[in-house]
Amino acid sequence: MTRPLPDEYTPFAARYVDLVPEDDLLGAMRAQQAVTRAAVLAYAGRPDFRYAPGKWSIRQVMGHMADAEQVFGFRALWVARSDVSPLPGYDQDAWMAASDFSTQPLETLLNGFEAARRSNLLMLGGLDAATWTRRGLVDDHAFSVRSLARMLLGHERAHLDVLRERYV
């Protein structure tokens, strides 16, 4: 699949899109599953660890990743189905404040992320070539299905990078 053009996503989203150089996006998403599971379970003995005061715990990072997987996947589905209604933004901090991730086992949060990923893979795998370039409005910005799909994987990779770099 060809890469999205810069006008198919926002400059903020570029940080995620740029983390996905692969042409075989769905294959890369499938391959990433084992990497993510191993990376997250490496913290199973300290799921409440925070690298600094006020930062999210491992559980919260995993819960956020699951939320974002569902949000980005829903956005991709919305745009793929040619719904012209604009979608709202997503305030990750407000969602975190309303979550109960700190009470859930890390494995449960990981399983939720993986279930959302499987659902997204099934949905994306059923799209025809023309649908991937379809565009819709998200938070007052145009996004294509292919940019939203790359954001799914890029977001995952970005948070795994944070875990490796800061949660040591």
Image (tube, rainbow, N blue to C red):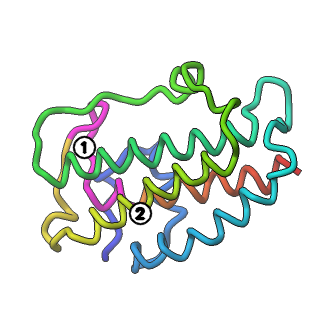
Q: Magenta segment: does it hold 75? A: no
In reply to whether residue 139 is colored magenta, the answer given is: yes
Tell me which residue sits at (81%, 36%) in the image. 48
Relative to residue 92, is residue 153 depicted above or below?
below
Nearer to us in this view, 125 or 8 = 125
In the foreground, 24 or 49: 49
Q: Residue at x 54, y 76 (%)?
A: 31
| Above-or-below relation of 8 to 105 | below
Quadrant of residue 117 within the rendered picture: bottom left
Disc 1 target residue: 142
Label 2 secondary element: helix
Q: Amino acid at mark 1?
A: Ala
Q: Which residue bears the numbered disc 2?
A: 118
Left/right placement of residue 98 relative to residue 26 reads: right
Residue 102: give x, y in percent of width and height. Answer: 70, 30
Q: Quadrant of residue 27?
A: bottom left
Q: CA distance from mark 1 to mark 2?
A: 26 Å
156 lies above or below 106? below
Element under disc 1: strand
102 left or right, relative to 165: left
Dot 1 or dot 2, earlier in sequence: 2
Q: Which label is found at residue 69?
A: none
Nearest the camera: 85 or 77? Answer: 77
**The magenta stretch spans which residues?**
137-149
Q: Position of residue 138 (x, y in %)?
A: 28, 37
Kindly indicate the quadrant of the structure image that contains residue 164: bottom right
Tell me which residue sits at (11%, 42%) in the image: 83
Q: Residues within 10 Å of mark 1 (few under 14, many from 20)?
A: some
User: Which marked residue is nearer to the observer: mark 1 or mark 2?
Assistant: 2
Query: Mark 2 belongs to which amino acid?
Result: Arg
